[in-house]
Image: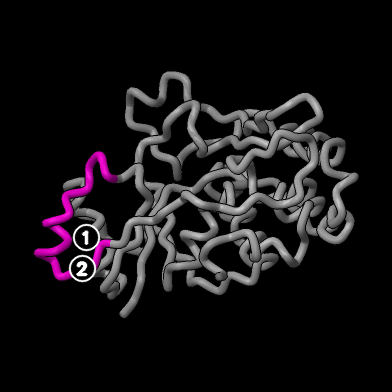
């Protein structure tokens, strides 16, 4: 049995994204699809004393979406974003119990090499966070494979090319996934359940699950995986 998960890359995603990665034997970044504004591709939320705050990477998208601009072709519009995000994270998380343990890693991610493509930035952060959490899943890209036409057909064919026998997918895909197509293809379809996460020690109540994984890491350190579903 080989489990495959396929998802567009997101910026410093929430813990559910990393549970999906950890449950798979191979995780495929699916960035050969249209970039969508006001989505998770280039932004995520953190906690602050004044409530939730968005961290957004400025990208070129105006006038390009109508031409089908893909995530993999989406470029950074202002490179000052990295320093601004790092300063914001520093201001809001420096008092967490484990911030100093991961400070050097995150500072290098933000202030080190500049990437011009959004997908490169997302991959860099996800790869580093996988290492922090101890996730060993193989990471690949849809560009490593040949894509065919058809929304569901394309996914089934990707799973087959990756020699997968099971496809793990989030509940949002229920709007378009045809379960019989996977049954006919002899591929087990497993729906990810994002309910029932335990709360963890978190600054600035009330508690919020839907924030970047960085919140969990800074607050819980090596115990972060105890509050995730795929490790238990």
Secondary element at tag 2:
loop
Number of disc labels: 2
Query: Percent from the top left, x then y, of residue 105?
Result: 79, 58
**Residue 180 within the segment the image draws in magenta:** yes
Pointers 1 and 2 in contact (CB under 8 A)? yes
Identify the residue shown where x is 38% and y is 50%. Answer: 170
- For this rendering, which residue is in front, 107 or 63? 107
Secondary element at tag 1:
helix
Tell me the residue that label 2 is attached to: 187
Tell me the residue that label 1 is attached to: 156
Q: Which residues are magenta?
A: 174-189
Is residue 131 shown above or below 204?
A: below
Disc 1 versus disc 2: distance between alpha carbons? 8 Å
* Quadrant of the snapshot with the N terminus: bottom left
Task: Specify the farthest residue to the top.
Answer: 63
Identify the residue shown where x is 89% and y is 56%. Answer: 100
Is residue 2 shown above or below 14?
A: below
Identify the residue shown where x is 58% and y is 44%. Answer: 11
Return the disc, 1 or 2, that comes first in the chain's sequence.
Answer: 1
| Crowding near the residue tagged with mark 2, few <14, some 14–19, many ≥20 C-alpha atoms within 10 Å | some
**Way the structure is coloured:** one colour
Identify the residue shown where x is 41% and y is 54%. Answer: 193
* Quadrant of the snapshot with the C terminus: bottom right
């Amino acid at each position: 049995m080989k489990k495959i998960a396929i998802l567009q890359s997101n910026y410093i995603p929430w813990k559910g994204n990393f549970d999906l990665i950890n449950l798979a034997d191979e995780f495929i970044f699916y960035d050969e699809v249209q970039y969508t504004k006001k989505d998770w591709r280039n932004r995520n939320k953190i906690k602050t004393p004044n409530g939730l705050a968005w961290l957004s990477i400025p990208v070129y998208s105006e006038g390009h979406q109508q031409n089908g601009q893909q995530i993999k072709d989406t470029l950074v519009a202002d490179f000052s974003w990295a320093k601004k995000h790092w300063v914001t994270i520093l201001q809001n998380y420096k008092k967490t119990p484990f911030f100093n343990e991961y400070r050097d890693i995150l500072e290098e991610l933000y202030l080190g090499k500049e990437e011009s493509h959004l997908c490169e930035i997302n991959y860099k952060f996800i790869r580093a966070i996988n290492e922090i959490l101890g996730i060993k899943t193989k990471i690949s890209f849809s560009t490593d494979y040949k894509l065919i036409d058809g929304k569901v057909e394309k996914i089934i064919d990707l799973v087959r090319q990756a020699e997968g026998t099971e496809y793990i997918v989030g509940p949002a895909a229920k709007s378009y996934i045809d379960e019989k197509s996977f049954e006919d293809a002899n591929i087990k379809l497993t729906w990810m359940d994002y309910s029932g996460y335990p709360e963890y020690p978190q600054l600035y109540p009330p508690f919020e699950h839907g924030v970047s994984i960085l919140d969990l890491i800074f607050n819980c350190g090596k115990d972060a995986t105890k509050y995730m579903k795929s490790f238990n």
